[in-house]
Image (cartoon, grey):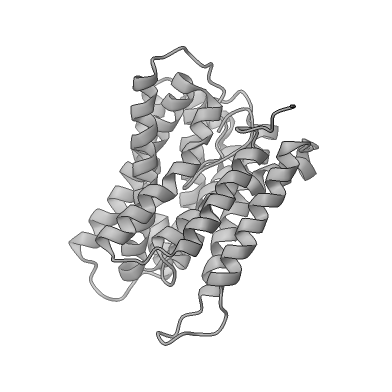
Amino acid sequence: MSTATTTTATSPAIAATATTVATPTKAWLLDFVLLAAIWGASFLFMRFGAKELGVFPTSGLRVAIAALFLLPIVLLRGHGPSLRQHWKLTFVVGVLNSAIPFACFSFALLSITTGLSSILNATTPLFGAVIAWLWLKDRPTGSRAVGLLIGFTGVALLAWDKASFKPDASGTATGWAVLACLLATLCYGLAASFTKRHLTGVPSLVSATGSQMGAAVGLIPLAWWFWPDHAVSLNAWLTVVALGVLCTGVAYILYFRLIERAGPARALSVTFAIPVFALLYGGVLLGEQVTPWMLACGVVIVVGTSLSTGLVKFSRK
């Protein structure tokens, strides 16, 4: 995301080295809300796609379409040489930051709600902070350390309530889905620290494009192998196009513009707004139930994440 590690919802760990420019609040606030709405919708689209296409075709098509969307933009902006120079590193980021997480969330959404998966996605900065501590020696102190404890307590409470490894009436075990979401956020955290260590100074759009290309290299063979036997409907194709172009390509452009206009701290906070839209979409369009316990755990996770990332700090008084 920034020279400070992080990530969000669907592919947050790409570092950005933009300089914050003073911009009126209304200008960046529109980008903020639009980005949260788009990334919130990605859980809905992944659910639709995975149910018809399967896990790997959905995630593979998503990153391939995103790469095809972003590549011409990178070349038109004259970043082709930088992309060729750093392709190996950006491909590694792509596997960690897109290929594995997108496949994990597509799998999870076959058995848990979009709202629950989006709340678990909000734990990404928690894992990012822990990995930065262990790998980059960026030790959290004070309110950040308390935030980690609070955040992971929220995760434990939510998982305890929602994760079960015994198949229910429909034959699904939600425990594996919850673990898949947490594996995705762990990979986001790894990608954030890898990006900070190896790609600092690389144009953000280059990192984003290279990562999608790398993810496509990793996922397309699996997408081909697991391609469904039945004919794919027009709705499924539109779903993956929306995932690739809107929820990945356009979202990246909005995200980097938000960093430039409002700074990395405000850009990071979009992670907390994503579940609001995901819960709304799931409740209105899918009739998913939002329980008070989910909301309470979500608040605990957001509070802990806000503290652990330094967005909110305890007063010295």
Residue 136 vs residue 273, the one in the foreground? 273
Residue 185 vs residue 304, the one in the foreground? 304
**Which residue shows up at 33% across the image and 28% down it?**
30
**Which residue shows up at 54% across the image and 46% down it?**
94
Task: Where is residue 226? Give x, y as percent.
Answer: 41, 70
Q: Quadrant of the C terminus?
A: top right
Residue farthest left in this picture:
234
The image shows a total of numbered marks equal to 0
The answer to whether one can see residue 103 in this image is no
**Which residue shows up at 23% across the image and 71% down it?**
231
26 relative to 273 in the view: left or right: left
Which image quarter: residue 143? Answer: top right
315 relative to 7 in the view: left or right: right
| Above or below 210: residue 230 | below
Residue 129 vs residue 80, the one in the foreground? 129
Task: Where is residue 299? Give x, y as percent.
Answer: 53, 50
Q: Quadrant of the N terminus?
A: top right
Residue farthest front in this picture:
317
| Above or below 83: residue 240 | below
115 relative to 88 in the view: left or right: left
Task: Where is residue 257? Give x, y as percent.
Answer: 42, 25
The answer to whether one can see residue 228 in this image is yes
